[in-house]
């Protein structure tokens, strides 16, 4: 981050006016800080994906296979035949410009090729040349061009500057979804072995060990055991998470990032405390899996096939363990995959039961087929039926705002559940301005596998619109805590706030719940799950 | 795997049928109808007069403009005499001049007006055959 | 200056000259009045249908609606019936709002940097111009049915009354024609003068716009300025619709220019972005219900993939699992 200019310099240097020279005549400039390192060939090879090799994006020679153009053309054609979305989206854009300034990467960088319409035109120009009559006849006038190494590099650079957040799709009069275009484009790049390492290596890890971080089963248990100790110290109860337990009621799956790094770890502790509570109070039996120990799915950022390969573990493990249904933790793209892809890819799910909350009797009708319920839906149901004893004053030192994560927002519609939960565990909640939340929410700038270290400038500039809105509520209401339901958010937003709004911290939803939860047998809780003193608590107790 | 089958066949075919129905509506609507362009019928008096207040081509395209000018000049300015380019003077009156010769409104005026789907509001005030009515 | 719109402008001018010289001066009225219109109609219908069928030949493997409102979950949370439909009825409503009212475009905002802050503002001009353009064009097209139907049906007469409600001018002004010309000119100006729009616009964006401007302009000229013999024009157009071909004398060259440009538009249509007319109905982010967890969506080409099974996993880590006290399938 040392090379990163100061926030003020970034803002005053921001120019959204495009250059005079046309975009087709402007060659790509792969700039340090804006791209991620090339995939480690070992990871690519482990997955059996094609053309694993050492290569460097900054080199002239990307060591492409000899017939790379043929591979791309065939891959393009094959996908046009498989995805109506691609075919229609290639054909019907009128370039009305509605999407142009909706992308956080365009807003934050001013790079015109980050306008969603142009990101798509990078591919459309080749589509017109290869697959349409008018492209063949009118050439450049019809907006078509030939595939060259330069174009390929441009694809690579800009397809890894899109976080598949779908914000542009909300504004498009035809629903053209740049996420769909990026997913498709990255699939083509993967045919040539052109993945980034921040995606390829987690995918290989996940394939082998069950999670992106490559945590092996015993280590996974160890890490949760640390949290058991922490919780005992801070809450005074000994929670006993179960692992790979056959015959448990519910299998719980969440991103592994939350067992690994702060502040996600506090969210993980929140889950554990909640599950302990449910077990003690209601005998509700939840198990974790070390085999399916990853909710996130970076395969989604590689190809549909890779997504399916990683996702298969969820149902396989649920079947093996004989649970009734699956509960999913707080994660963004994990929920896009679960909600819009999982059952189509790896269903049907005749071995599971239609999810019912045994504590409240609520049938989760909306999940009756996929049989996986979001923790925010589950929590909202418990709170609505008054099944959680809560002392919300324990979060009184927090002024909370909520960041809608892109995927649960625009690939699912999860808006009210988390807000309902927050309002019931916190006394001070303030939403950010309307055009920066819910379906118009802004990405953290690091989604879709871009949360590496080497592309920090991209991430921080891409986070500008989100940070700007956070700053607004910080200045207006004194907001000091940014809540979210996404593990990438929990990894990325603290970096964002540190740079743009250093006074604001980041939390998961379940951490806030666990802080307010009154657990049977708890001692006087004078700290939150982070071990930080709760302001006023100690004095009050002294006075008693 | 270029597929020959249509996916969502029912909906796609239904959409195409609606599209085709809308586009072919004129052909179906007119089916079996012969609707030649109407010839305005001239009364013997009009035939005998040979010339109108202006030449036929002008009258064909601009008669509404002429009548509009006549109305404004006679009603608002009180002037009632129109002199045509060839020097002949006419009374500016739809009822007494135009309909004097073209007394067959249905065969002369309405045919073309109906054909072209125009609905002039002349007839809101001026009744068909003013002289008979008088 | 920009090669994209200059090319489009020149192309439309050439087309105008072509029709003027061909039908007006050289007298190929049958070619321009009969042959080209039929050809255009056949290409338009055939092209349009085949494009739609081509889209339909690709399946929709995943249910991927863009959810722009609260999902339907717990019964006590009210959900967004049209922006995030969970039923087919909701989808139909969403599509109606999208197609008839340009709902998504209505959300449009702009952003600017001011005093170290990002400021967003609602931006409804694009929505307004787009709506004005499409509806005036539709009205103009329906009104033109009077040239293809005999007798003229009541709904066209009504539409004409509505369109001419101002009762101004002579011949009575139809608002739609002027709105069409104004809206297309504004949309063109937007493309030329907004730097962002100029940057993303292709010749294929300018060409149809300029073509429609020329069509509207020639239409207005014929009605209000250089009037044509309407009866003769209808004789020709109705002849097309009844297959009783007639090419009467005395129709002005302007009419043939107008007709020819319309034919060019029809021919161009299926091969261009104008296919968004059909495409919007086929857009999977809009035309699907967000019920993918409640109803299984089937992918017709779903093929088996290599997975890393639990058995392979346990085989690799069994010892460590046993040591850590994790349950295993096969005793160590």
Image (tube, helix red, strand yellow):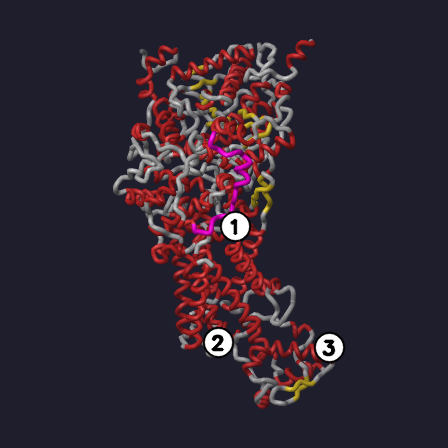
Q: Is residue A86 magenta?
A: no
Instruction: Name above or below for residue A127 compared with residue C216.
Output: above
| Rendered image: mark on residue B76 | 3
The residues bearing labels 1 and 3 have C-alpha atoms spaced at a distance of 49 Å
Q: Is residue A441 among the parts visible in the rendering?
A: no
Q: Quadrant of residue A187?
A: top left
Q: Which residue is mark 1?
A: C99
C-beta proximity under 8 Å, tags 3 and 2: no
The residues bearing labels 2 and 1 have C-alpha atoms spaced at a distance of 38 Å
Q: Is label 3 in a helix, a strand or a loop?
A: helix
The chain under label 1 reads: C
The chain under label 3 reads: B
Q: Is residue B118 left or right of residue C4?
A: right
| Rendered image: mark on residue A27 | none
Find residue C208 and report its horizontal and vertical position in percent: 46, 59
Can you say which quadrant of the picture contains the C terminus of chain A? top right
C-beta proximity under 8 Å, tags 1 and 3: no
Instruction: Name above or below for residue C111 compared with residue C236.
Output: above
Q: Nearer the viewer, residue C252 or B38?
A: C252
Find residue A328 and report its horizontal and vertical position in percent: 47, 25
Q: Which residues are magenta?
A: A2-22
Q: Which residue is mark 2?
A: C251
Find residue A423 and report its horizontal and vertical position in percent: 62, 26
The chain under label 2 reads: C
Determine crowd level at label 1: few under 14, some 14-19, many 20+ residues with C-alpha closer than 10 A: some
Q: Is label 1 in a helix, a strand or a loop?
A: helix
């Amino acid at each position: 981050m040392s090379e990163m200019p100061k926030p003020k310099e970034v803002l005053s240097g921001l120019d959204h006016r495009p250059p005079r020279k046309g975009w087709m005549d402007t060659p790509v400039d792969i700039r340090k800080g804006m791209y991620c390192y090339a995939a480690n060939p070992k990871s690519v090879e482990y997955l059996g994906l094609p053309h694993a090799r050492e290569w460097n994006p900054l080199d002239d020679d990307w060591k492409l296979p000899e017939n790379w153009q043929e591979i791309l053309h065939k891959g393009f054609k094959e996908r046009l035949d498989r995805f109506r979305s691609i075919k229609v989206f290639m054909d019907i854009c009128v370039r009305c410009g509605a999407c142009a300034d909706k992308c956080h990467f365009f807003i934050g960088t001013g790079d015109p090729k980050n306008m969603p319409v142009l990101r798509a035109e990078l591919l459309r120009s080749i589509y017109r040349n290869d697959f349409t009559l008018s492209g063949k006849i009118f050439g450049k006038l019809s907006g078509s061009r030939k595939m060259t190494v330069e174009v390929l590099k441009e694809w690579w650079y800009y397809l890894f500057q899109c976080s598949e957040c779908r914000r542009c799709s909300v504004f498009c009069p035809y629903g053209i979804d740049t996420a769909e275009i990026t997913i498709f484009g990255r699939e083509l790049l993967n045919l040539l072995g052109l993945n980034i390492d921040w995606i390829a290596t987690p995918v290989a890890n996940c394939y082998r060990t069950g999670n992106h971080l490559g945590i092996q089963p015993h280590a996974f248990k160890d890490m949760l055991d640390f949290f058991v100790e922490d919780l005992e110290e801070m809450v005074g109860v000994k929670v006993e998470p179960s692992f790979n337990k056959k015959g448990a009621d519910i299998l719980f799956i969440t991103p592994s990032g939350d067992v690994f790094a702060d502040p996600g770890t506090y969210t993980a502790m929140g889950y554990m405390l909640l599950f302990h509570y449910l077990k003690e109070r209601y005998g509700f039996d939840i198990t974790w899996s070390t085999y399916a120990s990853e909710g996130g799915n970076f395969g989604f950022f590689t190809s549909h096939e890779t997504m399916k390969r990683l996702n298969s573990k969820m149902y396989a493990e649920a079947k093996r363990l004989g649970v009734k249904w699956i509960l999913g933790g707080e994660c963004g793209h994990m929920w896009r995959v679960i909600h819009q892809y999982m059952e189509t890819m790896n269903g049907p799910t005749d071995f599971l039961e239609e999810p019912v909350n045994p504590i409240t009797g609520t049938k989760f009708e909306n999940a009756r087929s996929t049989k996986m319920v979001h923790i925010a839906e589950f929590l909202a149901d418990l709170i609505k039926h008054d099944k959680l004893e809560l002392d919300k004053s324990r979060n009184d030192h927090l002024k909370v705002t909520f960041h809608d994560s892109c995927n649960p927002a625009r690939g699912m519609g999860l808006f009210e559940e988390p807000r309902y939960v927050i309002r019931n565990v916190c006394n001070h909640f303030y939403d950010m301005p309307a055009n920066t939340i819910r379906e118009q929410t802004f990405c953290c700038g690091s989604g879709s596998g871009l949360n590496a270290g080497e592309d920090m400038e991209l991430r921080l500039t891409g986070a500008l619109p989100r940070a700007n809105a956070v700053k607004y509520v910080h200045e207006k209401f004194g907001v000091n805590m940014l809540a979210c339901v996404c593990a990438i958010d929990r990894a990325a937003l603290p970096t964002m706030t540190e740079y743009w709004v250093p006074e604001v911290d980041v939390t998961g939803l379940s951490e806030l719940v666990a802080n307010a939860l009154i657990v049977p047998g708890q001692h006087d809780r004078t700290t939150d799950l982070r071990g930080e003193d709760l302001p006023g608590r100690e004095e009050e107790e002294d006075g008693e | 795997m270029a597929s020959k089958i249509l996916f969502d066949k029912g909906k796609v075919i239904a959409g195409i049928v609606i599209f085709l129905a809308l586009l072919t509506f004129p052909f179906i609507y007119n089916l079996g109808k012969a609707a030649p362009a109407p010839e305005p019928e001239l009364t013997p008096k009009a035939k005998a007069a040979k010339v109108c207040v202006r030449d036929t081509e002008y009258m064909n395209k601009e008669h509404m403009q002429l009548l509009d000018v006549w109305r404004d000049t006679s009603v608002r300015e009180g002037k009632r005499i129109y002199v045509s380019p060839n020097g002949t003077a006419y009374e500016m009156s739809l009822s007494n001049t135009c309909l004097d010769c073209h007394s067959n409104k249905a065969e002369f005026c309405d045919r073309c007006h109906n054909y072209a789907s125009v609905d002039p509001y002349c007839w809101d005030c001026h009744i068909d055959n003013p002289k008979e009515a008088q | 200056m920009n090669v994209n719109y200059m090319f489009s402008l020149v192309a439309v001018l050439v087309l105008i000259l072509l029709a003027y010289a061909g039908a007006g001066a050289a007298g190929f009225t049958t070619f321009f009045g009969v042959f080209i219109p039929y050809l255009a109609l056949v290409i338009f219908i055939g092209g349009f249908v085949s494009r739609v069928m081509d889209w339909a030949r690709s399946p929709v493997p995943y249910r991927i609606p863009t959810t722009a409102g609260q999902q339907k979950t717990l019964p006590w949370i009210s959900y967004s019936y049209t922006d995030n439909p969970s039923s087919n009825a909701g989808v139909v409503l969403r599509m109606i709002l999208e197609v008839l009212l340009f709902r998504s475009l209505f959300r449009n905002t702009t952003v600017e940097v001011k005093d170290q802050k990002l400021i967003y503002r609602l931006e409804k001009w694009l929505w307004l111009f787009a709506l004005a353009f499409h509806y005036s064009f539709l009205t103009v097209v329906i009104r033109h049915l009077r040239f293809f139907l005999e007798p003229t049906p009541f709904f066209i007469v009504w539409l004409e009354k509505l369109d001419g409600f101002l009762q101004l001018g002579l011949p009575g002004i139809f608002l739609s024609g002027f709105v069409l010309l104004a809206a297309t000119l504004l949309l063109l100006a937007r493309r030329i003068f907004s730097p962002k729009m100029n940057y993303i616009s292709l010749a294929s964006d300018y060409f149809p716009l300029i073509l429609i401007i020329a069509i509207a302009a020639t239409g207005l000229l014929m009605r209000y300025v250089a009037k044509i013999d309407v009866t003769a024009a209808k004789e020709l157009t109705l002849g097309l619709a009844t297959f009783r071909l007639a090419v009467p004398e005395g129709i002005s060259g302007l009419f043939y220019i107008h007709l020819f440009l319309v034919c060019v538009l029809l021919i161009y249509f299926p091969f261009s972005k104008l296919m968004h007319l059909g495409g919007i109905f086929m857009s999977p982010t809009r035309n699907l219900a967000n019920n993918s967890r409640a109803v299984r969506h089937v992918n017709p080409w779903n093929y088996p993939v290599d997975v890393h099974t639990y058995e392979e996993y346990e085989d690799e880590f069994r010892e460590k699992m046993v040591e850590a006290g994790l349950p295993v399938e096969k005793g160590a």
